[in-house]
């Protein structure tokens, strides 16, 4: 299968600071990547669709100024949590699909556990 | 938008028994339905998927069925083993590779 790498796997930051999470497709090009948030024992909630070379598409209720997404290349998307607060603490995970024009398997990064203190 | 409902939220079975997880979706345009297994602290991994032009698909102990008319799809695991214990998510692809997940089912297989 395809490989998606996410970094860092864990991060602890102080309230008010910003944190950047990277998602890379290592062996394929991904024009579209997705960012999810997962609370303990809950499902993956889609936050936004990251589009290479254009603005991200955010789901309803997700603050675009709080969760900045940049997809500058075909293999890298970044999620920046700005002015983080304790309620932003969560598991963030990205995914990408290798297939074009055919809906197919999503490959997930290993996730980032963010703790805001 | 698409909404995926999944039941049950928790399922406990004896080793060797079968487990069935059911999902419904709302968007009739969805035509790709993957199932993911997520072990504690790990990323979700695809275990089986089905497209809308197929009614059933099987891979060893795992099978998935799809009823497009009723907008139902189900996961069947036979001869369950302790290593099958995990959280299982159904999902529906609404187009543009956008995947919406069900709430998840926590499966416990008792030895």
Image (cartoon, rainbow, N blue to C red):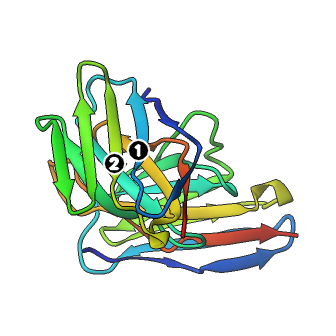
Which class describes the residues within 10 Å of circle 2: few (<14), some (14-19), or many (20+)? some
Residue B99 visible somewhere in the drawing: no
- Decide which of B83, B88 is in the foreground and name it: B83
Question: Between disc 2 and disc 1, whose residue precedes?
Answer: 1
Depicted B26 relative to depicted B31: above or below: above
Q: Is mark 1 on a helix, strand or loop?
A: strand
Chain assignment, label 2: B
Instruction: Name the residue: 59% across, 43% down.
Output: B9
Left or right of A108: which side holds A48? Answer: right
Labels 2 and 1 touching (C-beta < 8 A) = yes
- Decide which of A41, B64 is in the foreground and name it: B64
Residue at the extreme left of the image, as rendered: B53
Left or right of A19: which side holds A76? Answer: left
- What residue did someone put label 2 on? B76
- What residue did someone put label 1 on? B20
- Decide which of B74, A90 is in the foreground and name it: B74
Residue A4 in percent (x, y) is at 38, 74
Instruction: Name the residue: 81% across, 54% down.
Output: A87
């Amino acid at each position: 299968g395809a490989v998606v790498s996410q970094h860092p796997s864990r991060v602890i930051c102080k309230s008010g600071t910003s944190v950047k999470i990277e998602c890379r497709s290592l062996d394929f090009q991904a024009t579209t990547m997705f960012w999810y948030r997962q609370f303990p024992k809950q499902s993956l909630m889609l936050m936004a669709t990251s589009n290479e070379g254009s603005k991200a598409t955010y789901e309803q209720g997700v603050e675009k100024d709080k969760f900045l997404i940049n997809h500058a290349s075909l293999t890298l998307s970044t999620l920046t949590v700005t002015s983080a607060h304790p309620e932003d603490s969560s598991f963030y995970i990205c995914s990408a699909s290798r297939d074009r024009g055919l809906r197919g398997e999503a490959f997930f990064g290993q996730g980032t556990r963010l703790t805001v203190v | 938008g698409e909404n995926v409902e999944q039941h049950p939220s928790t399922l406990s079975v004896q080793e060797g028994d079968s487990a069935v997880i059911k999902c419904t979706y709302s968007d009739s345009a969805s035509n790709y339905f993957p199932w993911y297994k997520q072990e504690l602290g790990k990323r979700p991994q695809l275990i089986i998927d089905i497209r809308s032009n197929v009614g059933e698909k099987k891979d060893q102990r795992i099978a998935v069925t799809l009823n497009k008319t009723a907008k139902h799809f189900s996961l069947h695991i036979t001869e369950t083993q302790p290593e099958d214990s995990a959280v299982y998510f159904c999902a529906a692809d609404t187009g543009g590779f956008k995947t919406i997940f069900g709430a998840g089912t926590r499966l416990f297989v008792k030895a």
